[in-house]
Image (cartoon, helix red, strand yellow):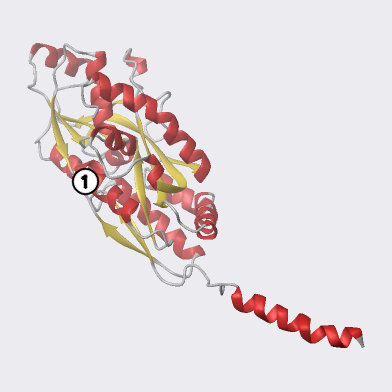
Amino acid sequence: MRIKTALPSLLFTLALILAAAPAYTAYPEKPVSMIIAFTAGGSSDVQARIMQKYWDKYVSEPWIFVYKPGAGGIIGFTEIAKSKADGYTIGGLNIPHLSLQSLAQRAAFNPDSFDYIAQVVNDPQCIAVLNSSKFNSFSEIIDYARANPNKIKVGLVGPLSGHHLMFLEFNKLFPDVKLSRVFYKGAADQNAALLGGEVDLIFGNINDVMRSIDEFRVLNVAAESRNDFLPDVPTLRESNIDLVSDIRRVFAAPKGVPAEKLEYLRKIFKKICTDQEYLADMKKAGQPAEYLDGDATRAYIQSQQAKAHKMLDEAGLLK
């Protein structure tokens, strides 16, 4: 009798608990906006489009590209940081751009403005000229520029981008060598400028130059060791220039995304980044894939803050 009497009460209590609990909603239940902070056709866009193919493999809802180029990524990065933190807006960030801009340009974001999903690319920078260039080595460019200040134009994506940081590091190593910098909105514009003869050389990502490799000649790679995409090209260190510079591409959401949605995004991105077909597509596109999970990505970005602060301070650009 006691069990029969208690049962209705237990069922009533359970019903109250279920009624009070929030209803579970599958995520995502609508398309996700993917913000790209650089021009269509650039390295960031190319990589994101490869990833989109595999997002569609694992997720029922698509993502929709939203382009917000300009100011070395600041416009797009700000858009990501200021978007609603509901899991339906994510975007690509470039490092060290993020650190440089938050320190030197009073950007409306900083590294703590985002929840990090994953790092997907570690793209060393390199020095490229046209095949028709009279310069056969970076040493020749340095010698010419030393004798002819500001006569040589170098194309950069920036300002306050990884390309700009490499330029600042170069200036520190060679204070008597004056190159004339020219900034562009994105890598596609930078490549077009070199192809059109607007600039004499570019500091560009390996992926950028690989897409025009038939027209470009790469003189050096700014990496610790030779790159698999350009195995015959020496590093700058092999040419006695102690300069290592790369651009990391990461994906993030606005700070405050619900934990379960962030975890879902991290799991999907890990699936994509370990998919052998995805890795083959990345290699085919000249994209140097390197996966880090969200926590490792945040730790790396934090480690770069001190370096960025020091470089900007020495260049008189810190605000």
Q: Quadrant of residue 238?
A: top left
Q: Residues within 10 Å of mark 1 (few under 14, many from 20)?
A: many
Q: Quadrant of the C terminus?
A: top left
Q: In this rendering, is residue 98 above or below 15?
A: above
Q: Is residue 293 visible?
A: no
Residue 282 or 266: which is nearer the viewer?
Answer: 266
Residue at 60% from the left image edge and 72% from the top image edge: 21
**Is 192 left, or right, of 286 in this rendering?**
left
Residue at 13% from the left image edge and 16% from the top image edge: 145
The percent position of residue 142, horizontal first and vertical second, equals 18, 16
Q: Amino acid at mark 1?
A: Ala
Q: Secondary structure at mark 1?
A: helix
Residue at 47% from the left image edge and 52% from the top image edge: 278
Q: In this rendering, is residue 278 above or below 111?
A: below
Residue at 44% from the left image edge and 54% from the top image edge: 256
Q: Quadrant of residue 83?
A: bottom left
Q: Is residue 26 visible?
A: yes
- Residue located beneath label 1 in the image: 188
The percent position of residue 235, horizontal first and vertical second, equals 36, 22
The percent position of residue 221, horizontal first and vertical second, equals 33, 27
Q: Quadrant of the N terminus?
A: bottom right
The percent position of residue 316, horizontal first and vertical second, equals 20, 22
